[in-house]
Each structure stands twice: as structure tokens, then as C-alpha cells.
């Protein structure tokens, strides 16, 4: 699309001067599936120090990440909340699959920023209660590409950028934007695909009411090998989401796994 580089660079320029006040590192512990008092009760900064990431580089990445999130919250608080819930589910799946250190940080950052490209989609399209036109649907699908380009402009790691780009790819190769198939899709993006779908199914949206967590898990299980990586689904299903059902209060259905970790 013509003009996209300038559009993304302009957006990033405004965000990287926004400051980082109001975003506690305790976010991981309280909202992202890490119960205080457990061996995993540590901030992502501590995880990075234990890994191979340069501390100065890690500090820059975290600063940019929080700045993006503050802008996401200003645009749409529910979109920010969705990103946090997806992050909670993603980190639990990632740990179940054995991810740690820098790899877990990549998943953490990609999960929180997977929908950042929606900042460039008109609110009237994102919040439309009725069916989208074909043109509107294509614009919404572009958020994965917008997100990748915005994060590249902010100098976030390549692995984070490509995971954001690929979070709507399908295991059978019928997703978007690149129609990647199977393990051509980055593992972090395959994890995001499951976590994002779970939250989309259980959250109330302008165009549908959320279903119960158990029903969402059953649907995800049926789509293993089609939409989703079977190995990721296998790691996801034993997690507490299966205990959520349609009798749960709406706020619990929306929060999914993140609500149970509070």
C-alpha cells in the first residue's frame, strides 16, 4: 500500500516519546498467569537477565513495549485487556512447551502487541456491530502486516515482528497474510493463534456474545491440525481454561485463563 512506511514511522515517532509511567512490571505476576510466591514469581526483566539478552537492549525493548501498550489503552481499553489476556494464555502454553529466557520474552512481547496494527484501522470498522464488507474485512486483515511494520520501525526483535505478522496463519496453510503452513509458521505465532482464538471465542464482542470456556476448548480441539498446531493445542487443553463454562459470570468468561490466575 502506498504511503505505508511513512504512516508507520509517524505512528512510532509519536509513541516512542510517550513515556512509560503507570505500567508495573508486576503485570506478569498479577495478570499473566504467574502466581506470587511460586518459583516463576519473577519479572520479565529478571528472566532476561538470566538469559542471553543484553540488559541495555532488553531495557529498550521493554520501554518501547510499554509505550505501545499505553497507546493501545488510550485507543481502546478492551483491546488492551484482550492483549493482556492473550499474553496470559500464551505464556502458560509457552512454559508448558518448555520455552524460557529470551524465547519466552519474544512470546511475551508478541502476545502483548499482536493487535497493535489495529491502531491503524478505523474504529468504525473494528467496532462495527454488523457484518463487514469485503473491503472492510481486508482492511482488518491488514492489521497483522501493519503490526509487523510498526514493530520493525521501533527496532523490536525480528522474531517478535514475524510472530505478530503470523498470528493469523493457519496450520493447514489457509490463513493470512502469507498462507504459511505447519512449522513454516513461527512457534510463537502458532501459540498466539490458539490463545487469541480462545479469547475471541469467550469474550463478548459487538457482533457476538462470548461462549463458555469449556465450549471454546472443545472447538479449539476440533480444529487441531486445521487451524491450529496439534502440539500447541495439546499443551493448551490441560490448562485451567477447561474449567470455564457458560455458567461462569461474563467477566470470568471474558478473562479466560487470566481471570483464574488472579
Image: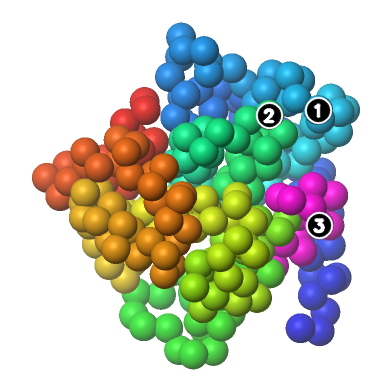
Local SS, label 3 = helix
Front residue of 121/115: it is 115
Query: Residue 132, position in %: x, y?
Result: 42, 83
Residue at the left extreme of this rendering = 247
Please name whichever residue, 32 or 205, is drawn nearer the observer in this view of the structure: 32
> Looking at the image, do the residues carrying marks 2 and 3 touch, with CB atoms under 8 Å apart?
no
Q: CA distance from mark 1 to mark 2?
A: 8 Å
> Which comes before the other along the chain, label 3 or label 1?
1
User: In the image, which residues are magenta?
Assistant: 146-160
Provide the secondary structure element on which disc 1 rests: loop
Which secondary structure class fits the magenta region best? helix
Q: Which residue is mark 3?
A: 152
Q: Quadrant of residue 54?
A: top right
Residue 52 is labelled as 1
Q: Is residue 152 above or below residue 257?
A: below
Label of residue 129 in the image: none
Question: Residue 20 magenta-drawn?
Answer: no
Q: Is residue 54 above or below residue 76?
A: above
Sequence-wise first label, 1 or 2: 1
* Residue ID at (24%, 56%): 218
Q: How is the image coloured?
A: rainbow
Report the side of 43 relative to 48 (left or right). left
Tag 1 and tag 2, C-beta contact below 8 Å: yes
Query: Along the polypeptide, which appears first: circle 2 or circle 3?
Result: 2
Q: Which residue is the site of mark 2?
A: 101
Q: Position of residue 166 (x, y in %)?
A: 62, 63
Amino acid at each position: 500500500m502506498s504511503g505505508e512506511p511513512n504512516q508507520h514511522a509517524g505512528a512510532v515517532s509519536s509513541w516512542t516519546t510517550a513515556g512509560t509511567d503507570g505500567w508495573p512490571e508486576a503485570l506478569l505476576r498479577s495478570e499473566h498467569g504467574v502466581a506470587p510466591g511460586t518459583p516463576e514469581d519473577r519479572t520479565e526483566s529478571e528472566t532476561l537477565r538470566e538469559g542471553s539478552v543484553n540488559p541495555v537492549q532488553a531495557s529498550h525493548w521493554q520501554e518501547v513495549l510499554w509505550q505501545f501498550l499505553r497507546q493501545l489503552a488510550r485507543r481502546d481499553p478492551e483491546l488492551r485487556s484482550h492483549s493482556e489476556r492473550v499474553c496470559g494464555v500464551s505464556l502458560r502454553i509457552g512454559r508448558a512447551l518448555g520455552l524460557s529466557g529470551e524465547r519466552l520474552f519474544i512470546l511475551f512481547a508478541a502476545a502483548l502487541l499482536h493487535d497493535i496494527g489495529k491502531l491503524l484501522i478505523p474504529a468504525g470498522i473494528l467496532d462495527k456491530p454488523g457484518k463487514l464488507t469485503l473491503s472492510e474485512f481486508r482492511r482488518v486483515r491488514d492489521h497483522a502486516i501493519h503490526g509487523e511494520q510498526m514493530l520493525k520501525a521501533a527496532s523490536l526483535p525480528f522474531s517478535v515482528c514475524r510472530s505478530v505478522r503470523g498470528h493469523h496463519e493457519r496450520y493447514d496453510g489457509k490463513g493470512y497474510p502469507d498462507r504459511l503452513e505447519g512449522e513454516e509458521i513461527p512457534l510463537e505465532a502458532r501459540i498466539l493463534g490458539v490463545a487469541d482464538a480462545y479469547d475471541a471465542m469467550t469474550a463478548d464482542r459487538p457482533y457476538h456474545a462470548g461462549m463458555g470456556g469449556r465450549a471454546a476448548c472443545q472447538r479449539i480441539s476440533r480444529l487441531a491440525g486445521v487451524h491450529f498446531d496439534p502440539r500447541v493445542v495439546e499443551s493448551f487443553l490441560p490448562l485451567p481454561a477447561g474449567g470455564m463454562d457458560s455458567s461462569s459470570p461474563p467477566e470470568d468468561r471474558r478473562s479466560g485463563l487470566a481471570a483464574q490466575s488472579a
